[in-house]
Image: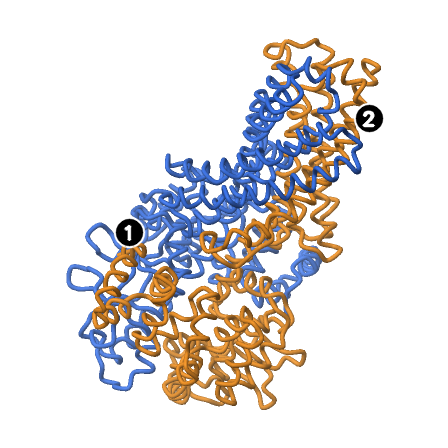
Chain colours: A blue, B orange
Amino acid sequence: MITDIRELTGEIEDLLEEKDYRKLRSIMSELEPADAAEILDSVDEDSIPLLFRILPKEFAAECFVEMDSDHQEMLISAFSDNELATVIDNLFVDETVDILEEMPANVVKRVLHHADPEKRKILNQILAYPKDSAGAAMTTEFVELKAHMTADEVFKRIKRTGLDKETIYTCYVTDDRRKLIGVVTVKDFLTAQNEEATVGELMETQIISVSTTEDEATAAMMLSKYGFLALPVVDNENRLVGILTYDDAMEIIESEDTEDMEIMAGITPTDKPYLRIGIFETWWARIPWLLILMFSATFTSKILQHFEDALAAETALIAFIPMLMGTGGNAGGQVSVTIIRGLSLGEIYMRDILRVLWKELRVAILCGVTLAVMNFGKMLLVDDVTVTIAAIVSVTVVIAVVIAKLVGGILPILVKRIGLDPAVMASPFITTIVDALTTLIYFKIASMIIGL
Amino acid sequence: MITDIRELTGEIEDLLEEKDYRKLRSIMSELEPADAAEILDSVDEDSIPLLFRILPKEFAAECFVEMDSDHQEMLISAFSDNELATVIDNLFVDETVDILEEMPANVVKRVLHHADPEKRKILNQILAYPKDSAGAAMTTEFVELKAHMTADEVFKRIKRTGLDKETIYTCYVTDDRRKLIGVVTVKDFLTAQNEEATVGELMETQIISVSTTEDEATAAMMLSKYGFLALPVVDNENRLVGILTYDDAMEIIESEDTEDMEIMAGITPTDKPYLRIGIFETWWARIPWLLILMFSATFTSKILQHFEDALAAETALIAFIPMLMGTGGNAGGQVSVTIIRGLSLGEIYMRDILRVLWKELRVAILCGVTLAVMNFGKMLLVDDVTVTIAAIVSVTVVIAVVIAKLVGGILPILVKRIGLDPAVMASPFITTIVDALTTLIYFKIASMIIGL
């Protein structure tokens, strides 16, 4: 039922060695394109063009879309002009755009050169939209209807043009100036009581649409919220220019979530699967953040250097620095991740900042006091320290947790306000800030109580 | 175009005060159900039943599905038996199951009591599937066809029963024993060259399906990978029992991602939006992890206590403990989050553990050496320490990063192997483990070089 790709890849490799092209073709073309693409991505690089050429043309194009961009680029270079034109011809416009966005300029030029003139014009238009906008993610292959049409006329149009459309189930009704005036579904026609009803009678006129310049992630979340099959994309003057379909929206949401997680972990996002990224590329995605965070830790070092003599006099304090910093970091990380996710799901807005602070203040006091009480008991029973030391550490726990929760709650919102990605304000940065603050508070409290 | 819910909520509240029910009904019922539900969730709790009763029956049911479970429960208690029966009658089976899964036993009993007998039977069956399984997430309202049917017969059946189906566009073909033998789409019929073609001639027989016991997230990811509108769910004997639709799959994927992020940040996941969770519930979701991590830091404390005298003698070492622990934690967190995401996207499998280790070892050496070189320079130039101290810290950086990356790479995979959620092995836990190891290494190296 579920295809085991790795097992199948081994089988395919054996058949390639045996040069049993007939069997290769029959096995590969029975697969879902996504699975066949995974196999194409997994076999020896030299075999990819050969294996690709064995496939039936239309199926080959469907596989091509799903392949890694490195391999797509390699195949495009290997293609004859004729082959290239055939593949492009079999791709949807939005698929071609997705591929071209990852290609170097000379490859883009060659692809555009081999597209037919009408498609080239549309491709150029879509490529002009900003990356990650709804305009760049949309497809222009939708069914467009007029209000006066009847079910019969609609079905005739679908029969004539439907195979080239990305979805035929939701159709869009435009007026003479191509303004979007209604949405109607095939279901509306198939379940209509009156078989003579026109598009204008059946269509829904309360339309939810997005502008071409809207962020693609926002558009995808809207589609998901309303459970639409497709979301219409309009220009400034409400003219219909394209649609975002549910399958593309799903991909956008998944890669947006991956990106958020990567940024939250201090990694520059890449689109490629982990095992296919080279060592140096991985290093390059990770090292800038590690360096920034390492250098940021200098503040904490300076604070500790400042209290060096005091620490030498009261060495018992040293042992609890990691616990305090860890607890502060964890407490802050909990909030920042919650807020970042809430912002991206549209559950929290910037105007909620005071509600967030008020909530986190109360939660922080609850958490801080619980931790401090448990810690106080544990230090006396397990760590064998004086009541004074246990008290200093426990009071610091409360204050550190409160500060961490407030910093973790407020920073992602502020960062979003200045137009940056709130995900950068996740655990690593919060931890670094909270580390310095916690250390400072620790020694201030210690100074007050035992006069370091 | 995009509805501003908060603004609208204010308007609705004013109308409620003015008791202008006609206008309320007309504004609310023009909205998408998801938006109307958001408003119902946002108005004063006492007004919810009133506002809900104003809505047209079918629309009210659609809104009900999208509301918060607390408010759903409140409404169910407020409903008369008659109202309850009407709402249930207008819900899809999978929607009813989603709602019932969040309700206390007495509410479930009351709802089942007021469902019609046939629906009750189906509800009981679906409720018996394990939570978060494909069986529990599926809907039973799909279009079932027989191979001998013609387009006309299919369209007649859709016209008769289509309104109650969650999707009519993908239809499922079963044999006499209800075994799934094919899939056919409305598009296949609308674009068929031969209008007399039967279901059997048009259907696709290479079917991808999941079993009722499959994890719902795995099923949702499969649907997304293949871009299906719906994925058939079958029992042990390949009998079709339900379908998972793309809109439910999207919700599953989004809430799965939220859950992963929460677990990675050390929070017990909840289904509710942040601003609607109470203070004590939030505290309860966060405090267990904070306590566990706080107590785990005892290992690091013990190590520091063990080296207390040495530290008093060489206080310069203290200042760099936070930087070392921070860098180790960040380096480990980068890997663990990457691996956790790769595991859940199906890009990394357990059998890849050696490939992961080999890759991370090389990346870790690259990262570690880069950081150590930069740190060595910075310590000499900025921190004003001896070459010996700078060397001890820098060597520790390399080793800490290597250990952190290996631990971060291996632990999520091992945790998955023993059947737990790999997301628990994200930054907080990795940091705690790496903290202890880094401290130990730091002092071992210091002992070797300057003989503490």
Q: Amino acid at mark 1?
A: Ser
| Residue B420 left/right relative to B249 | right
Q: Nearer the viewer, residue B268 or B431?
A: B268
Q: Residue furthest left?
A: A176
**Element under disc 2:** helix
- Quarter of the N terminus of chain A within the rendering: bottom right
Q: Disc 2 marks which residue?
A: B306
Q: Disc 1 marks which residue?
A: A211
- Quarter of the C terminus of chain A within the rendering: top right
Q: Chain of mark 2?
A: B
Q: Position of residue B89 (x, y in %)?
A: 43, 83
Q: Quadrant of residue A283?
A: top right
B100 w.r.t. A241: above or below: below
For the residue carrying disc 1, how many other residues have a C-alpha within 10 Å: few (<14), some (14-19), or many (20+)? many
Q: Amino acid at mark 2?
A: His
Q: Position of residue A78 (x, y in %)?
A: 51, 46
| Residue A113 left/right relative to B73 | left
Q: Quadrant of residue A420?
A: top left
For the residue carrying disc 2, how many other residues have a C-alpha within 10 Å: few (<14), some (14-19), or many (20+)? few
User: Residue at position x 57%, y 87% from top?
Assistant: B175
- 3D distance between C-alphas at marks 2 and 1: 63 Å
